[in-house]
Image: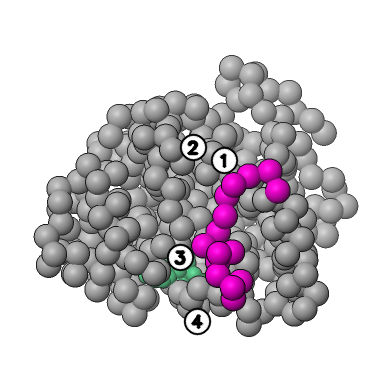
Amino acid sequence: MVKQRDPEEFPYEIQDVEPDLAAELMVPYTGELTGFVRVGPKGYFFPHKYKECAASFYNLPIRPGDVFVNTFPRSGTTWAQELIWLLKNNCDFEKASEIPLNIRFPFLDFSMLIHPELTRQMYEENKGDEEKMHYVKLSNMAGDEKVNNMPSPRFIKSHLPLSLLPPTLIDKAKVVYVARDPRDVVVSVYHLCKMHRIHGAPDSFKEFWNYFIKDQHYYCPLFEHVKEAWNLRNHPNMMFIFYEELYENLPFTIQRLNSFLGAAECTPQQVERLCDHLSFAKFKHNKAVNHSLLSKINFINGQYSFIRKGKMGGWRDYFDSEMIEQAKNWFTENLHDTDLAYPSMKTAAS
Ligand code: A3P
């Protein structure tokens, strides 16, 4: 079924995913119980709930001074968020450890991912506990309501591709886009989906991979998502960075980000402290960035950590020769029309 939209409100078509495919996908994707949609000419794939949020995301009032972190999921969003927040808040490490990152830097599209039945379960399972209920309400709050209530300067995370965010965004706000080797992204998304009750994934990574490269996962097609931002990389309000740059030269990326954000210059001691704070070992045990509130309400399986392995090239442990070949073709088909090149493509080991 094709939904006709008021083009003033939302210009793209939202198409239901064919019922047979939706039924097949809902077996492993246990968090979705209704179905999926594809949006616009690129066919961005979302849970059915996107339909009710599309116009509010697209028409979100943007304020000058807003800072957005925009990524395909599992590309280094959390890492960049914490760094940006600290740079723009005079390296206030104390406040950063007291207030969870998802309160300081909320995720616009999160509640879209929670199926109404899971919302019901969240309320039911956590009733009677004031702290947990506060977080349940916050998680389920519509994205626009959540960020419209924030005082400026606002820090906002979104995984939506730029074309589904307000067209005024790039001229009014600053956008930091983080991209990562897509093979590492898929592995990381797979683990996230296995640990998260709102998602679910097949037992086998290979099965998941085969859905993913057919763009049958949230926010896919991945390359289109990245190319939208890459095409804007020279815009003065856009900073495009790779996870691999954060990984390989964090002090340099800190300086670049600092001047992009117009933040006060960091002292060498502050840069050193930032690098320590953002190191994988410290980050993994930092409760303020590890989505510990989701674990508290039992929506993340306790044995997994949101900050997981933090490796470059970790995909090699998951891909057999057939998948390596599929990945090569996936890259070739999607990169033939762009000068986008991932750092890993420039090394012989890729
Ligand atoms: P892995 O699952 O490969 O470990 P996002 O924040 O966009 O969801 O991205 C999460 C990915 O970034 C995870 O990848 C996570 O471990 C990695 N990551 C987060 N913080 C990191 C850090 N300080 N150093 C290295 N990798 C980090």
Q: Ligand 1, what quadrant?
A: bottom left
- In the rendered structure, which amino acid carries the disc numbered 4? Gln
Q: Residue at x 85, y 48 (%)?
A: 19
What x and y, as percent, mark residue 307?
43, 72
Determine the CA span between mark 4 and mark 1. Answer: 35 Å
Q: Residue 141 — which label?
A: none
Q: Residues within 10 Å of mark 2 (few under 14, many from 20)?
A: some
Residue annotated with mark 4: 303
Structural distance between the alpha carbons of marks 1 and 2: 7 Å
Q: Which of marks 2 and 3 precedes in the sequence? A: 2
Q: CA distance from mark 3 to mark 2?
A: 20 Å
What kind of element bears circle 2?
loop
Image: 176 above or below 33 = above
The quadrant in which residue 197 appears is: bottom right
Ligand 1: does it lie within 8 Å of the C-beta at label 1? no
**Residue position marked by numbered label 3 in the rendering:** 244
- The secondary element bearing badge 4 is classed as loop
Question: Do residues under tags 1 and 2 come within 8 Å of each other at their CB atoms?
Answer: yes
Q: Which residues are magenta?
A: 336-350
Q: Of the residues shown, which amino acid type is indicated by label 2? A: Leu
* Quadrant of the rendering where the N terminus is positioned: top right
- Which image quadrant is residue 207 in? bottom right
Q: How is the image coloured?
A: one colour
Q: Which residue is mark 2?
A: 232
The residues bearing labels 3 and 1 have C-alpha atoms spaced at a distance of: 19 Å
Dot in front, 4 or 1 = 1
Three-letter code, disc 1 = Glu
Q: Which residue in the structure is indicated by mark 1?
A: 228
Q: Point out the image quarter for the C terminus.
A: bottom right
